[in-house]
Image (tube, rainbow, N blue to C red):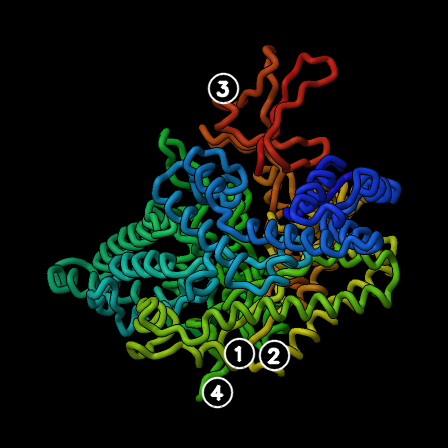
Amino acid sequence: MKVIKRDGRAVDFDREKIRVAISKANKEVRPKERATKEEIKEIISYIEDLDKKRILVEDIQDIIEQKLMEIQKYELSKKYIVYRYTRALVRKQNTTDESILGLIRNENKELAEENSNKNTMLASTQRDYIAGEVSRDLTKRMLLPEKISKAHEEGILHFHDADYFIQPIFNCCLINIEDMLDNGTVMNGKMIESPKSFQVACTVTTQIIAAVASNQYGGQSVDLIHLGKYLRKSYNKFKKEIESKYKGKIKEDIIEGIVQDRLKAELKAGVQTIQYQINTLMTTNGQSPFVTLFLHLEKDDPYIKENAMIIEEVLRQRYEGIKNEAGVYVTPAFPKLVYVLDEFNSLKGGEYDYLTKLAVKCSAKRMYPDYISAKKMRENYEGNVFSPMGCRSFLSPWKDENGNYKFEGRFNQGVVSINLPQIGIIADGDEDKFWKLLDERLELCKEALMCRHYALLGTKSDISPIHWQYGAIARLAKGEKIDKLLYGGYSTISLGYIGIYELTKLMKGVSHTDPKGHEFAIKVMKHLKETVTKWKEETNIGFALYGTPAESLCYRFARIDKERFGTIKDITDKGYYTNSYHVDVREKIDAFDKLKFESEFQSISTGGCISYIEIPNMSKNIDALESVVQFIYDNIQYAEFNTKSDYCHVCGFDGEIIINKDNEWECPNCGNKDHSKMTVVRRTCGYLGENFWNVGKTKEIKQRVMHL
């Protein structure tokens, strides 16, 4: 029999622990009130005779109290209850010591793998993690209602970003970069005036990005369309300078050629500033700024030509990559790129198709950009096209007092995600039980989300002047509360969800791609959407349904449920749950059918949605990628490419790492044999799990699978 501890661990049943616990309580009561050795043995035997494969530690304690009452040992039962309560208080004391010491000793594996953008060896990162562990501990013990903390521990829900909850800061946002550049801003008490050139605009933009990242915990997005006017300013400046010196002395076309040469040099330097600054800056939380650059054109934009030039240079530099410490060009983690497909660049003979071809070429080598269909997005968001936030969540349409749609300068208050497969496991095919339990747990999620809201309520703008006073979000007065921005849908607050596929398998016995399962899955999705809409009407807060892209949460929920409910075929046996509404990776479905199928779910999950398709050896499949991109424009709002190609971090080789005659992994391009400098994917099953060594049956070839 396995005993499920409060932290989710499964341990062997140990009868001695029960005997010791009752014996300790025995010593606290009069001799005639004590349980005899035989009575203690009978209690233990009763528990063992239940013949359960798994039992919660709380259930064992409940049984002990019940049996002591049955044998009329009331005083002893009371002492045992007090003992149990005392142990609970001990558990509620500070729990950070070991995790922090493990971090300093580089032994805390969970933290080391939590964020690939953070190096836990660095002092600056350790400081942030130490603060995070303290915040997580205080959040669990003191700030959250006990039932919310318990629900988080049991995997009923996930209270995201508890390591920052102690502070009144929010999740992610769309920076109002237009306002900050056009009207100036203030950083570190210093006035930053509106730039007079493209190069300066790029420098100021990166300074803003760094300042914003240091005062929130989620990602941020910047729409580069606002830089077009500054490239025009540089052009006009160069034109004026060259004409004042050479007009009438040399031909106009030569003057224009000189101006264009200077403009191209400025364009390259400005974009390089953004790329290198973002990748070399370190924010106060010990990592590079988590930032997304939004690349889109608008046909009525007076600076559309300049913005096309900017997008082209961004894609060109991303394709080239950034040199690592060994001087080899590699793929930078940031900024993330999101490229918009519209009628004039959807590879159907449009004027800007050349940009999309470059974007596809870049995706094949560097994995980015992601793609948004302006056509489908307008259908879902009242005719609007705008960037996802850094966390890939979307804002709801909102109009200002003049009736104009506004997206930049808005933000997300926080996220709580629900574990759908766990409800399916407990319901065991009983739909009445499922819907009842789903609603109960949704109310728990609402309560948890309101905790996030109340944590921000009453916050004064002084907490982060760059956000609230100097334009990133708003221009509030010093000492003014941010409360008005928390209501009316100006900001969102998100309900995430994991495991539509597993839930459907549990309740209907088939995948949600099967017609029978599909009907049920859509019904669940619509219920989730209707629930957050109801919450919005009840509270005047912008609740939204968010297809959670937190891949680590897929593993956490599955691990908890496996420990609690055991191995369930095609559910907990995989080691992960499928993200949000996605099709399970093992289903045989081509890229086009997958995108078309998932698009229906995206139109419901408007608070956040992204779909993935996997194409092996993308660098050799440019034509296939272009076909998929064309399909994305007509069929789905938001998608990105993944690949299973091996990758050498020394030379940038993107293909298949070989096993040489000495049975070692080796890059066929540069000969690199250092496993720490290559990413090797196990092709037989596409496993992307933890690092480990596997010795084959012949014990001749050692194979390493790297964690992606």
Residue 134 appears in view: yes
What residue would you read off at disc 1? 489
What residue would you read off at disc 2? 536
Image quadrant in which you'd find residue 446 = bottom right
Quadrant, the C terminus = top right
Q: Secondary structure at mark 2?
A: helix
| Residue shown at 87% from the left, 53% from the top | 509
What residue would you read off at disc 3? 671
- Badge 2, how many Cα within 10 Å: few under 14, some, many 20+? some
Q: Position of residue 117 (x, y in %)?
A: 45, 44
Q: Position of residue 677 (x, y in %)?
A: 48, 28
| Residue shown at 51% from the left, 63% from the top | 143
Q: Nearer the viewer, mark 1 or mark 3?
A: 1
Mark 3 vs mark 2, CA separation in Å: 58 Å
Amino acid residing under circle 4: Gly
Quick check: 523 above or below 60?
below
